[in-house]
Image: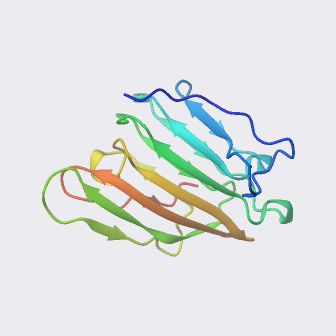
Amino acid sequence: MPSFKSSAPSKSRVFNNGLGSKRPVKVLSSGTTYVLKGRESGILLVLNNAFSSGFTITLPADTAANIGFTCTIFVATNISGTLSINAADDADVMFGGMKLLRTSTGASRAFQPGAAVDGLTIDANTKGRLEGSVFDITIAAANVITVEGRGVFSGTAATAFADNS
């Protein structure tokens, strides 16, 4: 298994995608929750634990200062507990989609969120909690969060989009 290390964000505390900039990386290998802050925009969160008791990531509030916030969540090892990715507010709605890629031969599946979706509840191997899953998330506007997920699954694919509030 590869070794992962956390890196500090740039001096401006915001990833600006400029030449020579490094993306901040935070490796999460213990605990049960992580609350993202607006100043962590651009961060890559690496989930490097099975988190058998579950793990919840809460996105920052969709204030004017956080519009454009973006993060990527990478599953570096199979998760056996529930992985929840939640909006900060029940009024927030997720848009976008998630493609699930099967670990064995067979069809992949794609899912879109419904009208009241404000989170992802990934509580089974059928929903994309296996090693190699990646979720790109952006706060696009007030009450609008975009999600592009590429989840690795086994079994019969099922949607992870949920009303988590």
47 lies left or right of 139: left
Give residue 144's position: percent from left, percent from top.
66, 71
* Residue furthest bottom as drawn: 115
Looking at the image, can residue 6 be seen? yes
* Residue furthest top as drawn: 30
Looking at the image, can residue 91 be seen? no
**Front residue of this view, candidates 65 and 117:** 65
Give residue 88's position: percent from left, percent from top.
68, 54
- Please identify the quarter of the rendering in which residue 156 is found: bottom left
* Residue found at x 42% / y 29%: 2
* Residue found at x 68% / y 52%: 42
* Residue found at x 54% / y 24%: 30
* Coloring scheme used: rainbow
Tell me the quarter of the image containing the N terminus.
Answer: top left
Tell me the quarter of the image containing the C terminus.
Answer: bottom right
* Residue found at x 35% / y 41%: 131
- Please identify the quarter of the rendering in which residue 9 is found: top right
Vertical arrangement, residue 13 with respect to residue 93, above or below: above
126 lies left or right of 58: left
Count of marks, rendered view: 0
Vertical arrangement, residue 6 with respect to residue 40, above or below: above
39 lies left or right of 150: right
* Residue furthest left as drawn: 105
Give residue 159's position: percent from left, percent from top.
35, 62
**Front residue of this view, candidates 110 and 41:** 41
Give residue 64's position: percent from left, percent from top.
85, 66
